[in-house]
Image: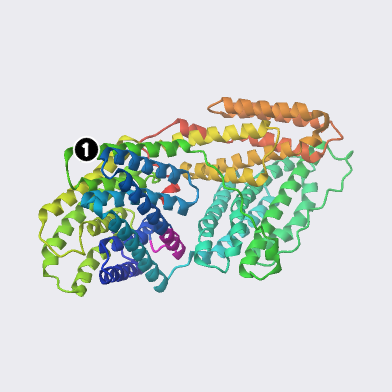
Amino acid sequence: MSRITADHWLLALRTVLAVWLALFLSMRLDLYQPAWAILAVMIVTLQPVMFTGGTPPIGIIIGRSVARLFGTLFGAIVGLLLIALFGQQPMLYLLFSGAWLAFCMYWVILEPDEYLAYVMMLSGYTSTLVSLTAIGTGVDNIWPVALGRFSETALGIGCALLTHVAIAPRYGSRALPGALSQLLSRAAGETLACLESARPREQRDGELKALLDRHQQFESLRGLNRLETRRLSHFIPALDRFASDSLALITAVRELETALDRLRECEDGERWLEPLRAEARPRLEAVETQPDAAPERFIALSDFAWEETEVSPRTRARAELVRQRLGEVLSLAQHGQRLRHALDDPASTRVKTLPRSRRPRANHNEHFVARFNAFRVFIAFEALGLFWIHSGWHSGYLAMMLLGVFTMLFAKAPNPAAVVYQFLWGTLAAVFFGGILLFLVMPVINGFALLAIAIAVPVTIGTLMTPHPRWSAIGMAGAITMMTLLNLHSTYTFSPTSYINGGLASVIGTVAAMFTYSLLRQRTPEQRIRTLMAAYWRGLGRLLSAPSLPNRARLESRLYDRLSRLIALGGHDDTLREAVDLHALALCVWRIRRLRDELGPHRQALEAWLADIGERLVARPRHDPAVWRALADEGMQWVDRLYREANLPIATIGEVAMLSHLMRQAPGARLEASSAEETPQDSPTDKEAVHAG
């Protein structure tokens, strides 16, 4: 293990103090099972640490704590209902409790809001914890079990929150203005660089990746704002909307580079680029150097002063396209600058101009993932339950409890079997060292002080192990399993048989979860990319042919959700560029369809061509570059045809030319090729692991 940092020691101090406080209060109040309060402290504190590698921001702790509180409440209520209805009918209990677990799992996978998904996750496995504990200890005890589970979980959550707030709290939202400044400054600098001169593709890709990194940093911090401070709470809708606006800004920069390349190919391209450069440079420099300054009133770029008979239609179309994309970049950058300035000055009158309503939530297209996870949770729970009932093994309810917890807790992880395997080692270690603590240390303990010291040792060890990726699951599992096995409230009795049965049940439950994930494997990232790409083509096909157009905000919301998943599953730089190209392609199609009334006599024929493209894209499982080149050639034929129409708006022709150029880049071809070449031996890189549990 690497050197233990001061942050990790501080994290251990917070955790130990929270555990001591929870243990003292639960014993003082004579609660049902003090170990549950300690368990709540450990999970609230350590679960986020597994994925952040250190002390998480206080916003994550608050969000998880509130979600855990409500999830435990709902789960306890469901557990009461399960016992009330099926307490004397084990087969019906298995059926309905497994169905509830499957329903919660389905919701967890589909729900885009992290904390609402966490509520459903807790509701799922808390219902089994409450009902199975009642079955194992006596159905008559169901009310004390449910009440104790909720009250002690609430106590543990409160103690964990108190120590995190009181001892050197870390506020992630304080970095939000800086992250927004970096995003805006980087976007403005990239726009200035592409206006000055053409650059190699490798350099562009590097800048694009850096820009997307800034976007993802802003995206990860904006959710903390609503949880950590009330001062900026009225900015939540504006921040949520700018999350997709910032992706549109990156796409606009990408399209601007393409439009500039096309304009520079014209002999007189620099002549018409120079006035745009001169007009945009001071505005972009202001955003780059002072992104937090008060933005000036937005003024659209001036129209070109040309004689149409003296400038070729090709040059006019390309120059007008550059003007439009540059204007879009300036508009989005100044919108971001207005938001950034308002974060520093909430009393500013400009705050009233920010969006007051959130963008519509997107429905993502991975129902097959949700259905599969719900299915394997149900099958595993039923199979182990049948073994438990027919074997007559009294302690088998503990194995059922751990199976429910692990199958719910790590379903979103990219490789849940590997995580549960680590938990298995932690469980084995906890059973061994818990036995030492219970049978060698507990008999000689007299008083709360010695008990607190004895509990602090495994808690400290588990906390110090959790921030390290290699040992995180082992450390957390060891601490949690030990707290589950130790009955801290009852009078000490030497009962090795009962302890061995409980330890064996914990191991079997963990092994059952590991086998569930190993035998019923999730679709690989390549298969999920293939399905997401198919959903994208279907959506693009509808956009190309539907009589009515969706609202742009709704379209961008759907694109934002789908392409973010593609980036997470792809896990390499090429995926970033592919996602931006796909985003640009959809928005370009939307613009052309929006301008369809200006096509005059060509409207019907051009819309028929667009609809035909949609049918061909949906019909093919893969789209190789040759297909895209053929479509791009057809688009350029349309452009040459429209150039000869003097009464058509030049902006419409430019959009068709941009569509042709984007299709020539073969958007999505690399993603489709990677999804066709499945490599099971590769470890998945799904970034959704950050939200697992």
Residue 185, percent across and down?
62, 60
* Left or right: 456, with 270 as reference point: left
User: Residue visible at 76% across and 32% down?
Assistant: 639
Q: Quadrant of residue 588?
A: top right
Looking at the image, is 256 positioned above or below residue 603?
A: below
Expressed as whole percent of the image width and height from the top left, the position of residue 617 reads 60, 28
Residue that appears at 16% across and 62% down: 437
Q: Nearer the viewer, residue 245 or 452?
A: 452
Question: What is the x, y in percent for residue 619?
Answer: 57, 25
Residue that label 1 marks: 387
Q: Depth check: 491 or 189 in front? A: 491
Query: In which quarter of the view is residue 72 placed?
Result: bottom left
Stretch in magenta: 54-66
In-front residue for pair 624/275: 624
Decide if residue 338 is on the left or right side of residue 49: right
The percent position of residue 213, horizontal first and vertical second, equals 53, 53
Q: Residue at x 60, y 62 (%)?
A: 235
Say left or right for 399 vs 639: left
Callout 1 amino acid: Phe
